[in-house]
């Protein structure tokens, strides 16, 4: 195989490569109205074979008595330039075949009707939530899992209430989940006075939902302890939620037995940790859930907490009614136009620049 044949094969394969790139983008972004024409792409390898077979016959030869003075001069660009029309010709034919298959883009849009669910996540942020039976601690693990839950509910309005000895709204009901997640990440222990006011946390959550016009109203109440502060008892707050038709899912967070938890805070703001008993008033949490039509869960580690949020996600699915509309538009013109431009360049190079004398 001489040099001209090798160059013809390389340019031919590059032409097939250009066509393959064009087909990749066409198949990715478009549908084909006449896909059977794509079988015509099989002609491209035959064109490569033809270019290889005919390359010697198209080039004139001159016999010299000696060629010593024309010794090897290294790589020469001119033979590659002379064979450039091969690349252009094969690429143009490939693009024409794709155009014949009539690629079409599809413009689609949807009419979406949702039966909205408004959700308030009510989170205990007391010092005991820094216990290390979760990784890295109960509070951070609860925040991470809750953020994943928010990501799984793109059609719902969600808000955040936090509580220790008092409660306050960190984020009201919103469909802007980016803002909600940003505020979630700012939550930390010590934002209000210490203690665990479960009843206040639930009551504040109910006040955020009572005027909602959503078809379904839900509170996810998370705590790792017992109610020991606040002016509203948890059962009283549950009765208020029941009156406003608000379901409450309660989650007790903490391993069974003992856990490494903060027992003293130093003047520099750091905590002393000791193993202490995990005390969760599961009876009260179960009663709150039963009264409001919700469900009680116990999370003893991060994986269990994630599974609980996934179950709540399944229990409280937003109903969506979708009507799809679509409109197709022809896109073959661009493939034909580019193919025509490439073929024109090939013709000009072959007839005006790379003329072959008879």
Image: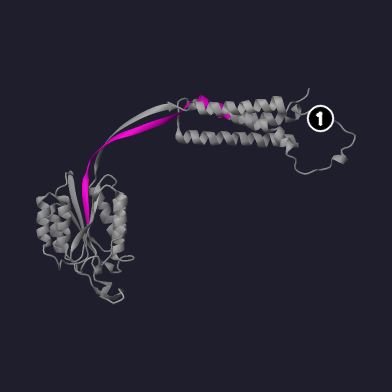
* Quadrant of the frame with the N terminus: top right
Judge whether residue 98 is colored magenta. Answer: yes
Residue 255 in view (yes/no)? no
Judge whether residue 54 is colored magenta. Answer: no
* Quadrant of the frame with the C terminus: top right
The colour mode here is one colour
Q: Where is residue 140 drawn, in percent x and y?
A: 31, 63
Q: Where is residue 96 drawn, in percent x and y?
A: 55, 26
Q: Quadrant of residue 78?
A: top right
Residue found at x 84% / y 42%: 71
Residue found at x 15% / y 67%: 229
Number of residues whose C-alpha sits closer than 10 Å to that of mark 1, classed few (under 14), some (14–19) or many (20 or more)? few
Residue 78 in view (yes/no)? yes
Q: Where is residue 102 drawn, in percent x and y?
A: 48, 26
Left or right side of 18 for 166: left
Residue found at x 60% / y 31%: 91
Left or right side of 118 for 337: right
Q: Which residue is mark 1?
A: 61
């Amino acid at each position: 195989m001489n040099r001209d044949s090798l160059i013809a094969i390389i340019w031919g394969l590059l032409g097939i490569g250009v066509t393959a790139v064009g087909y990749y983008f066409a198949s990715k972004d478009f549908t084909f109205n006449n896909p059977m024409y794509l079988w015509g792409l099989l002609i491209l390898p035959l064109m490569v074979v033809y270019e290889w077979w005919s390359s010697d016959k198209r080039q004139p030869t001159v016999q010299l008595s000696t060629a010593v003075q024309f010794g090897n001069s290294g790589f020469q660009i001119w033979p590659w330039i002379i064979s450039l029309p091969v690349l252009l010709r094969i690429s143009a034919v490939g693009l024409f075949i794709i155009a014949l298959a009539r690629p079409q883009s599809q413009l689609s849009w949807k009419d979406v009707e949702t039966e909205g669910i408004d959700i308030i996540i009510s989170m205990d942020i007391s010092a005991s939530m820094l216990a290390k039976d979760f990784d890295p601690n109960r509070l951070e693990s609860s925040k991470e899992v809750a953020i994943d839950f928010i990501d799984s509910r793109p059609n719902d309005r969600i808000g955040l209430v936090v509580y220790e000895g008092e409660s306050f709204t960190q984020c009201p009901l919103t469909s802007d989940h980016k803002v909600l997640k940003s505020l979630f990440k700012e939550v930390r222990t010590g934002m209000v006075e210490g203690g665990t006011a479960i009843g206040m946390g639930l009551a504040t959550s109910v006040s955020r939902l009572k005027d909602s016009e959503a078809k379904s109203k839900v509170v996810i109440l998370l705590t790792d302890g017992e109610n020991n502060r606040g002016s509203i008892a948890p059962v009283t707050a549950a009765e208020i939620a029941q009156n406003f038709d608000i379901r409450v899912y309660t989650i007790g967070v903490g391993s069974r037995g003992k856990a490494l938890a903060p027992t003293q805070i130093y003047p520099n703001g750091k905590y002393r940790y000791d193993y202490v008993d995990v005390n969760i008033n599961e009876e009260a949490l179960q009663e709150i859930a039963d009264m409001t039509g919700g469900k009680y869960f116990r999370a003893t580690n991060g994986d269990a907490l994630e599974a609980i949020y996934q179950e709540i996600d399944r229990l409280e699915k937003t109903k969506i009614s979708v009507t799809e509309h679509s409109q197709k538009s022809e896109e073959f013109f661009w493939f034909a136009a580019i193919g025509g431009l490439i073929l024109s360049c090939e013709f000009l190079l072959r007839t005006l620049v790379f003329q072959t004398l008879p």
